Image (tube, rainbow, N blue to C red):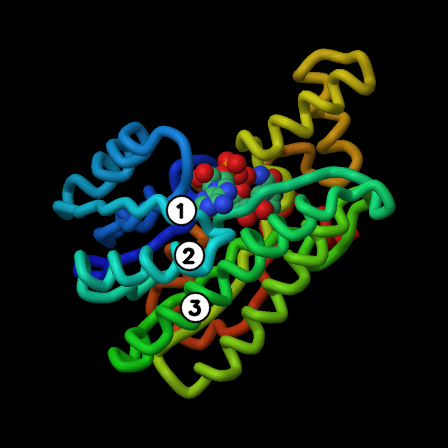
Amino acid sequence: MLQGKTALVTGSTSGIGLGIAKALARQGAHIVLNGFGDVDGPRGEIEQAGKAHGVRTGYHGADMSRPAEIEAMMQYAAKEFGRVDILVNNAGIQHVSAVQDFPVERWDAIIAINLSSAFHTSRLALPGMLANNWGRIINVASVHGLVASAQKSAYVAAKHGIIGLTKVTALETAQTGVTCNAICPGWVLTPLVQKQVDAKAAEAGVSNEEAKKLLLGEKEPSMQFTTPDELGELAVFFCSAAANNVRGAAWNMDGGWTAQ
Ligand code: NAD
């Protein structure tokens, strides 16, 4: 379905970004990876997923908190692949602390990585998408773009912000073949959440498995984690022709979290 298209997925060396990159590769899209840590492992998984379609991969290690590095990454993608057809703004970090104790440096980093980076990649990808009259921008927000939790001020502010950016981008492209939507996962068991499981286990003096149940029980009626593969299939839907007129949606996949 996506043969000949190129998808750039920020933060695709791990977790949800890797799941989305693999799902898009399974549909034939070439993938530009981004993110820290091991690159060869995730890159191999994506190439394996896209093997039947001869999918090519590239990698750029831009730090999403730095606009100049984001510009270099977008130039790299245009040079190596011609154009970015699908942009998935996924890179994100978390910090848990009360407002009055929140480290200023963590606030700035979360706003830069979880929100401003999506503005920079979008402003740089849109001219090519509009010239081609086809494009997909998928912003990985969160249930925390729709509702709040205590101790997560910067994260909740950034995620509400990225849903606002999604709506404005969708309106500005509404009469074109470019769409912009947001995905709002509940709990997904990635390294980002494992840190919160570990903290809960330490705080409550319980096992890892018990801590997972406590976390899910606080918020997620299904008592199940959403998986990166499931989120990947939602991203594939947004890229399909059936989603041509899905614009500015903030689509939750959250086990009922925001239905309460
Ligand atoms: P993760 O920690 O597994 O992956 C984060 C990715 O972002 C990694 O590839 C990491 O290298 C990259 N990254 C971090 N800082 C970066 C930077 N400065 N520049 C470039 N890359 C950077 O986390 P995840 O859980 O897969 O989260 C991915 C996205 O999904 C985030 O935006 C997160 O807020 C969102 N999300 C996660 C959950 C969840 O439960 N895990 C729920 C809702 C939303």
Q: Residue at x 77, y 52 (%)?
A: 148
Compare residues 245 and 47 and report the one nearer the observer.
Answer: 47
Crowding around mark 1 (Cα neighbors within 10 Å: few <14, some 14 to 19, many 20+) is many
Q: Nearer the viewer, mark 2 or mark 1?
A: 2
Residue ranking furthest to the bottom: 175
Image spot of residue 234 (x, y percent): 45, 53
**Which amino acid type corresponds to the residue marked 2 in the rendered image?**
Val
Say above or below: 232 vs 40.
Answer: below
Residue bearing mark 1: 20
**Which amino acid type corresponds to the residue marked 3 in the rendered image?**
Ser
Image spot of residue 1 (x, y percent): 24, 59
Residue ranking furthest to the right: 100
Q: Are marks 2 and 1 in contact (CB under 8 Å)?
A: yes
Image spot of residue 144 (x, y percent): 69, 52
Q: Which mark is residue 67?
A: none
**Which amino acid type corresponds to the residue marked 1 in the rendered image?**
Ile
Residue bearing mark 2: 88
